[in-house]
Image (tube, grey):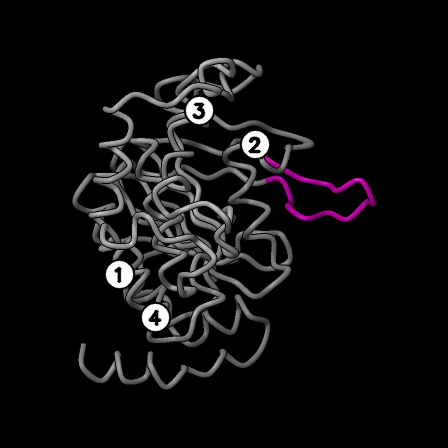
Amino acid sequence: MMLQSTDQSPAALRLVGAGVVYPNGTRALHPTSLAFAEGAFTVLLGPSGAGKSTLLRSLNGLVPLTEGHVEVSRLGPLRDARAWREHRRATGMVFQQHQLIGRLTAFANVLTGRLGHHHALRTLLPLPTAEKRLALNALARVGLLEFALRRADQLSGGQQQRVGIARALAQQPSLVLADEPVASLDPATAERVLALLHGICRQDGLTAIVSLHQVELARRFADRIIGIGGGRVVFDGPPDALDDAAVRGIYGGTPPAPTPATRMLEDVT
């Protein structure tokens, strides 16, 4: 059964009749309309191939819509390249595989989060001191200031993902999109990284939309869970409404078993 969110907060952005068909003819997202509340931590939950990454990436144009559109509270419908650029400038993106430049330091990688705020020619010159302070502050917030001058490819997976979060923070975003940000991490590290991201978004009042496949993490951190299956929304509601029947509806069968780390987490919370 699909539940409708009762959150009455103003919408930071909306999908309106949004659908995606890939060039090979695959329907990845059926026409979907959703509103995302300002300051909420929303989790898109579902198995691999369900369409949650397609939905999430359509929110900043990484996956172009083939029908419908995206609306942003301060910009209205995103109809042209200029509106999309302005939206992306205020949108921090965190990726599953970090998308860092391995030969560059953690500091240099975080500093790339400021490039969207400058014209192309300006980025050929050293960025101002104020920008460097922003990058260092972002590293400090994720607990990696002491690793600022270490090459990214010399960091652990969890540390690399924290650099990715710091890079997103350096943009000074109002919206954070995180596409399976902990899927490549061990369970204990995944919980710590997601707790860090959740805490920062809470502290800064950021709107966050995060795709996950771990049911336990969704229940622990989400304000709202949107279940995706077969390119459609099959559940929409608060975490306490996500019972076993709802999970089976999302995953099309037996719910995924809790990992040892998340089972321990449930025991103490």
Relative side of 16 to 261, left or right: right
Residue situated in front as seen by the camera: 231 or 88 = 88
Query: Alpha-carbon distance for marks 2 and 4?
Result: 30 Å
Horizontally, is 40 left or right of 204 in the view? Answer: right
In the picture of the structure, the residue carrying the numbered disc 3 is 116
Residue 30 among magenta residues: yes
- Can you identify the residue that label 4 sits on? 189
In the image, residue 159 lies in the stretch drawn in magenta: no
User: Circle 2 sits on which residue?
Assistant: 61
User: Which contiguous range is marked in magenta?
Assistant: 17-31
Magenta residues: mostly which secondary structure?
Answer: strand
Q: Amino acid at mark 2?
A: Gly
Q: Does residue 256 sit above or below 9 in this rendering?
A: below
Vertically, is 189 above or below 103? below
Q: Amino acid at mark 4?
A: Thr
Disc 1 residue type (three-letter): Ala
Q: Earlier in the sequence, mark 1 or mark 2?
A: 2
Residue under label 1:
195
Q: Secondary structure at mark 1?
A: helix
SS for dot 3: helix
